[in-house]
Amino acid sequence: MKRLVPLLLVLLVGLVTPGQARDAEPNPWEVLGGMLRKGKQSPLDAVRPAAPVSKVEASELWDAFLTNVVKRSAGESGDASRRQEFLLVLLNGRYDGLSMLASEAAVPDPLRELFLLSWDRLAPALRNLAGDLDAKAAKPFRALAEAGDALKKAQRYGDSVGIHITPETLRQLARLVLPAKAGDPLAYDLALDPELRRIFGFGAPLPPAEPSLLLSARLPSLPSDPLSWLVPTAFAAPLAAPLPFDPETAALARRLNNWLPTPGELPDYLIEMRTLLLRTAETTLKQRESAGRALAEPFHVLYRHLVLATAWQESCWRQFVRRKGKVQPIQSGVGAVGLMQVYPVVWRGFYDVTGLQTDVGYNGRAGAEILHHYLRDYAIGKREHTAVGDADNLARGTYAVYNGGPGHLTRISKPKLRADLREIDDSFFEKYQAVKAGNELDVGKCFTGADQSH
């Protein structure tokens, strides 16, 4: 049988002409054959797999593929809940890549691993979307779902089938749904993407960041035209202007952005940082309401507490630290940065990555916006507070998602949770309870060795 596989693939490729996936009712194996043909990949050569890409390359390639497909698909729907379904697929896929990079475990074929982790989330979303559209509009999305299913099934047979998940395979998959003139669907960058924010209900980009004067050198600049590669989508509408800080809060953010407190300055610094965080929460509540994503008023106090406690847990209310005589953005071992420890690789496109690193006000607004999204659309949306009849469960569930991604919403109720995650959750909840009791300035206890200067 193994000897017949290359011949069967040759016959399979011959069954399909370019464009058939778009113009006919999709048959999964015919669509996959058409992809191989259009990609000029000989099935006889396919049984000789190329060397797997590295973890870093795989995470970027898969993220680029997933972002382009999800963005295109969600943009075809006017249903906010359908778009949220695709956003969940995107964020989970990005967290999969982050987890892979954080792990020291060897992964023989990381691109294949990421495909298999995400496909069972993406395929149902594509089929749900196809069910919402008319027959013609639905065909490319149904074709992608069927081809991906066939590709997944082919992985069961290993090298004997010879259909591998390569960068070119992903390009051909993505091009089933992308416009003919779209650029490389595997191009990866960190540029801000206003269209991505619009599609997923985040509204206009945050006001531009103001880099700290404490930094001795500017961080690498990003592409000057982040809009040049956008894929046009349906239901496009002008974005409302971003809601800036009021002048007093902007001045406060600027002052804190250029201040590393000495031990003697710490009490004043913490009082001012508390003010900034609370004003950031208020600004975010107003901005999200203007974007049609209002948080119900009974949850506003909980949200303010959540912002203070999360910033305490993540960074002890710091944006910068001094290392070896140089001021640097505070950064975790897996790349989260700044006051709210936002992951650039998870939130690329939604935020200015340089701003996350260099501006405490910008980083705070990004983290507060992410918390608002997770609280409103996940914790409250999934009725996490009703599971045990405790509103504090909303805060705990929201933070669990903030810390580990959407798949972690219910981890606080799992009796056999990993010890390190249990410790993280307990540490956060201790801080959250302190904030509720009015003791948020206890955050000062976690400052040590402040040899920093104003």
Image (spheres, rainbow, N blue to C red):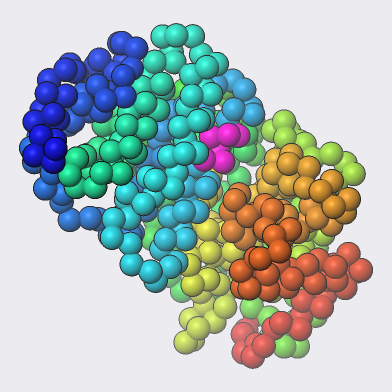
Q: Nearer the viewer, residue 246 or 73?
A: 73
Q: Is residue 94 visible?
A: yes
Magenta span contains residue 34: no
Residue furthest out toward the front: 1
Q: Is residue 348 visible?
A: no
Where's the N terminus, which quadrant?
Answer: top left
Where's the C terminus, which quadrant?
Answer: bottom right
Q: Is residue 20 left or right of residue 260?
A: left
Specify the segment rendered in magenta. 84-89
Which quadrant would residue 153 be assigned to in this image? top left
Provide residue 31's location: percent of width, then percent of height.
27, 23
In this view, 375 is above or below 146: below
Rendered residue at 11%/48% (across/down)? 48
Magenta span contains residue 87: yes
Q: Is residue 129 left or right of residue 318?
A: left
Which quadrant would residue 426 be assigned to in this image? bottom right
Main SS of residues in magenta = helix
Provide residue 278's location: percent of width, then percent of height.
80, 58
Q: How many marks?
A: 0
In this view, 3 is above or below 413: above
Rendered residue at 23%/55% (across/down)? 52
Rendered residue at 45%/32% (across/down)? 123
Q: Is residue 247 left or right of residue 402?
A: right
Q: Nearer the viewer, residue 168 or 335?
A: 168
In this view, 359 is above or below 332: above
Provide residue 284's location: percent of width, then percent of height.
73, 46
Provide residue 238's location: percent of width, then percent of height.
58, 24
Rendered residue at 77%/36% (across/down)? 294
